Image: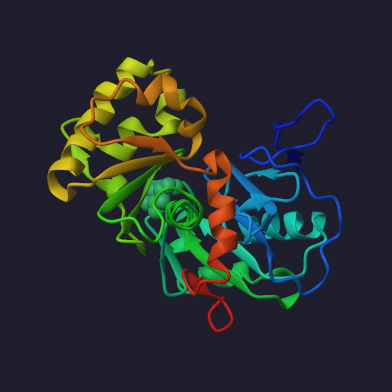
Amino acid sequence: MSRDAETDDSGDVRSRDGGGLDRRPHPPGDASVRLGIDVGGTSIKGSIVDVEAGRLTRHVLVEPTPPTATPGDVAAATRRIAAAMQWTGPVGIALPGMISGSSLRHAPNLCASWEQADALSWLRAPNGGNAVLINDADAVGLAELVYGGAGLDDSGLTIVLTFGTGIGSALLHNGSLISDSELGGLSGVAGRFEEVASGRVISTEALTPVEWAGRAQPFFDELQAILNPSRWVVGGGLSDDFERFLSKLELSRPISVARGGMHAGIVGAAVACGTGLGAGNSSSP
Ligand code: BGC
């Protein structure tokens, strides 16, 4: 397990909004803090989140996603993160696929056994606490809704896209999250956009920003034509390279980086614990 390398001179890890870390132990039962964990195709990251302030209160702990990425492997990693944080309270877990009953569908970056019935039961929270499961892009959208510019007073449609191992999507409409969209699965002439323009493809094919934009532009154009968003928000790995890549797109609507940047999925997962969004595990997993 490693720490996220987002440190200041004193070695403190700081949240994206510049707030310092809270080193005090959280009192048991403190409803303002929850553990958020973001499961990705390459890493599993977690931190304790102050959901009133929308900020991380601890170092982000990072576990590499095991090559097999079975439900058991991923559950073990989430438990190690919870144990390292000495956390026994509510946990929100963001997953890179569509949560469907007790299975995870459309999760090409994890192993096929996630599709089996009861696969999600592996993610029962450590020490019998409650876990709430949410799609990873929906978690970013939820964080944007609660803390970002697409708040409750916002009108129109905001499309949130996360460019990481895959391409995730969340739709925010008139202050609500419309969950479970899978827009990265749309296809263009070169194939499914997720397979030709994700953050992972940028690395594996060493795409330049201009080459990436050539592949991503038809994706944005298609979504603009079909859904007519008034604003775009980008999260996932690409949010750290926003200027270099996103500036190459030609868009008629404003685009911004998700407020929580790379850690928005962790924050959104923690928020999901208290909102009734996502799939609770008190009865299923
Ligand atoms: C999955 C989505 C997920 C996205 C980003 C896609 O492969 O189908 O559910 O949000 O990857 O992880």
Residue in the picture at 37% in, 55% down:
106
Q: Nearer the viewer, residue 214 or 65?
A: 214
Residue farthest to the left?
A: 225
**Count of numbered circles in the view:** 0
Q: Position of residue 203 (x, y in %)?
A: 46, 24
51 or 268: which is nearer to us?
Answer: 51
The x, y position of residue 43, in whole percent, is 60, 42
Up-down relation of residue 219 to residue 94 (above or below) = above
Classify 124 as above or below 22: below
**Residue at left offset 33%, top offset 23%:** 212
* Percent of width and height locating residue 41: 52, 44
Q: Nearer the viewer, residue 84 or 8?
A: 8
Which quarter of the rendered picture does the C terminus lie within? bottom right
User: In the picture provided, is 132 more to the left or to the right than 205?
Assistant: right
In the rendered image, is residue 179 in sight? no
Check the image and tell me how it is coloured.
Answer: rainbow
When asked about the image quadrant of residue 91, the answer is: bottom right
- Above-or-below relation of 175 to 9: below
Q: Residue at x 62, y 39 (%)?
A: 16
Q: Quadrant of the N terminus?
A: top right
Residue 75, percent from left and from top? 64, 61
Residue farthest along the bottom direction in this orientation: 283
Mark yes or no: residue 152 visible: yes
Position above or below: 217 against 227: above
